[in-house]
Amino acid sequence: MRSCTTDCIEKPIRRCFESLGKFVGLHPWWFVVLPLVMSSGLGGGFYFLNELKSDDIVEQFTPKKGRAKMEKRFFQETFPQSDSQFSVIRLNTDGVFASLIFSSQSNILSVTALDEIIRVDEEIKRFNVIFDTNTFAFSDICANVNGTCNSNVILDIFGYNASNFSFVNITYPKYCRSEFNCVHLGNVISEVEVNQDGFVQNAKAMRLFYYLQENNTMTDAWLQKLVDVLSNVTTSNTEVSYFTSMSRQQEFEKSTRSVTQLFAITYFLAISFSIMSCLRFDNVRNKAWLASLGVFSTAQAVLSSFGLLLLLNVPFVITAASSPFLILGIGIDDMFIMISSWQRTNIQDSVPNRMADTYREAAISITITTLTDVLAFYLSFSNPFGSVQSFCLYAGTAVLFCYFYNITFFGACLALNGRRESANKHWLTCMKVPEEAPSGRSKAYNLCCVGGSYNRNTGTEEEHPMTLFFRKCYGPFLTTSWCKAFVVLIYFIYIGVSIYGCLQLKEGIDLKNLALDDSYIIQYYDAENAYFRYYGPNVMLAINGTFPYWEESERNQLETCIERFLELDFVNSSTSWLHAFERYGVGRNISSEATFKTHLHEFLEPNPMLKQDVNITDDNITASRLFLQTIVQNATEKTVLNSLRETAEICPYPLLVYHPSFIYHDQYTVIGQVTLQTIAVSTAVMLFIALMLIPHPLCALWVAFAIASVILGVTGFMALLNISLDSISMINLVISIGFSVDFSAHISYTFVSSTKTDVNERVVEALAHLGYPILQGALSTVVGVVVLSASSSYIFRTLFTIVLLVVTFGLLHGIAFIPVFLTFCGFCHKLLKH
């Protein structure tokens, strides 16, 4: 069995840490002062924080090299937007706009409701804004058509007079004023009822748009004033919700500010928890100050890591703001491991020797978990989402600094505390106190002024009650046959529920989740989802390259391709300049190139809108586009996007499909694959590290097993809690990789390192040594993020929920599942001798 061990790497590392521990014990003040100077210097990087904040939603929460971003460039270059002929369906971007949704439980088209809508519309167009000493109104910056502001078609239809509605016959969803002037009303009014003649009688909601000129510096000021005006508008017959093109970004940026006030609460809770966990009634062995310094060490790590990256001009995204909460838990976990190892050293030894024993015992364990955490984060830096990259880089660097400060600064504090203990000095006053109470002294004196007792048989500190519980109660109970059977049953139930949850998992981020709960845009998104979910975007379909439009056979072949799109369940209709031109060409000769182009110029000249759909360069049609109206009520964004692209690819002509929303939808096409790839690569690397540092390959496999098991559980229960797989939850799955290693690696390493021969005894010993520190670490992690549960931001609440799942399942694996499974491995015994 000796040949199965891999301690040829682990042993030299242990010896190095043993020497380091002794050196820290001999020169503790060096390792106190130097880290303090280092963290103070690196902390200067926070000066650049504001200028390095990068919270652009498109840049950070969509794939960096998404296909739609490349398609956007093609459409912008090939079909540039006309400043004088504005068209919503021809926008290559989201545009600059404001949108209002009016809803009514009765009829939004009633005279009273329409009067209210028209009143609000007039108020919007009437107010003035002052910008750089200039006063302007909507009419000065509106997107226009032939010199007139682009207006709301539904209000135009009845002439901005509510009483006229009963005299106008409106067809739905398409309404045509003339052969070449048809508009789609599906995204303007909803839940429509029509009479037997097909004319609209009533509806439940109406949406108005106010589009502004792009690249106009005054638009932001007008949109901000609009939000202020609408926040004070009162309506009695309708409910109104509103949104602007800058609202999503503005409300998203508020999320960062909303969480900063929680930092102080978190560190107060962490310090309180650490002190409570390390309290002893013994006035010498009490480690309250040591616990506080452990939290301070973690704060130094966050200060140093963030400062360093900011000095290196690394962008700071909102997702990185959640990492300090997580790092706090990781740092405290390592602190508990080191304190636990210190308490098992011989009190009668010198401080340098005790430090050597502590480092030999604890350093490998925390090195394994640090390596796995850091690599899990750094390997995920290849992720195509900027928000994930930023979090992983900041979190991974913070974990690295956390490790560095734990073995230097906190180790030095441990040595200084050891000097105090060896002199039998009081933890608070640092005055020397008697080890045993003098006769005749009061109980108060004995409680406050006596300390320094230890186990005379072992030479170590008296066991903590929780350590005693794991040794005397929990460990023996867990290793009974019937308890093992029960644990295995619970595990299979856990796996079954997790697999079921994974099958329910949804993909992609809901953009409203980027705003705070009390944001005005939440109401707008809810109204949009309730009333305007049926009709989807008007998708552009471009024919890229020269095409013989004048040949009827080629046009028929192209028409076959278009028919394939129309056969898709979610495509409702198409609008094409070519179809309109063919109707125009009836009775005219358009069968030759020359006559086709001649009549095309005649046709396009009086139709400037359609002229934007044909790119004519050097009298050649280099590209053209048509439009597909989609219905997405029963189709997911991923299905729509993939089906449209696949249909375009099977046509014999180079076709491209595009809509500005596809930039957001691109996440659906990559997020599942990227997540699986990240998990697979990270797990493989974690396994390699475990094989190198845990001195038995078969036991190291249990660590890899724990990773897969915890990730499966977190993913499944995440889905059951209605959390989708998006760039935010993907971050937390990366966390799962590191944390699942943390808990199982500690137990596996201690189990393998035990000199006992019976597997049950080895499990009991592992639980006695690390059961309580693992429990402390789990609870400290929860304490580190628990305040996020009160956050009004979905991003931070999701972090809390998933970290809670990770910690819960990781703890279950660390102190229940893995210990029981290790007892089934009789081959993993008596591998090391110390």
Image (cartoon, rainbow, N blue to C red):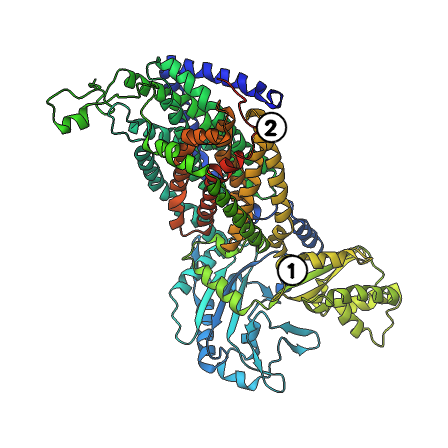
Which quadrant: the N terminus? top right
Query: What amino acid type is highlighted by mark number 2?
Result: Pro
Q: Position of residue 834 (x, y in %)?
A: 48, 17
Q: Nearer the viewer, residue 774 or 34?
A: 774
Task: Name the residue beneath numbered marker 2.
Answer: 697
Residue found at x 38% / y 13%: 352
Q: Nearer the viewer, residue 66 or 344?
A: 344
* Residue 249 showing in the rendered view: yes
Does dot 1 land on a helix, a strand or a loop? Answer: loop
Rounded to the nearest angstrom, the CA distance separating label 1 from label 2 is: 67 Å
Q: Do the numbered discs 1 and 2 sit on residues whose CB atoms are within 8 Å?
A: no
Disc on res. 82: 1
Residue found at x 25% / y 18%: 424
Q: Is residue 654 left or right of residue 780?
A: right
Q: Residues within 10 Å of mark 1 (few under 14, many from 20)?
A: some
Q: Residues within 10 Å of mark 2 (few under 14, many from 20)?
A: some
In this rendering, the answer to whether 702 lies above or below 694 is below
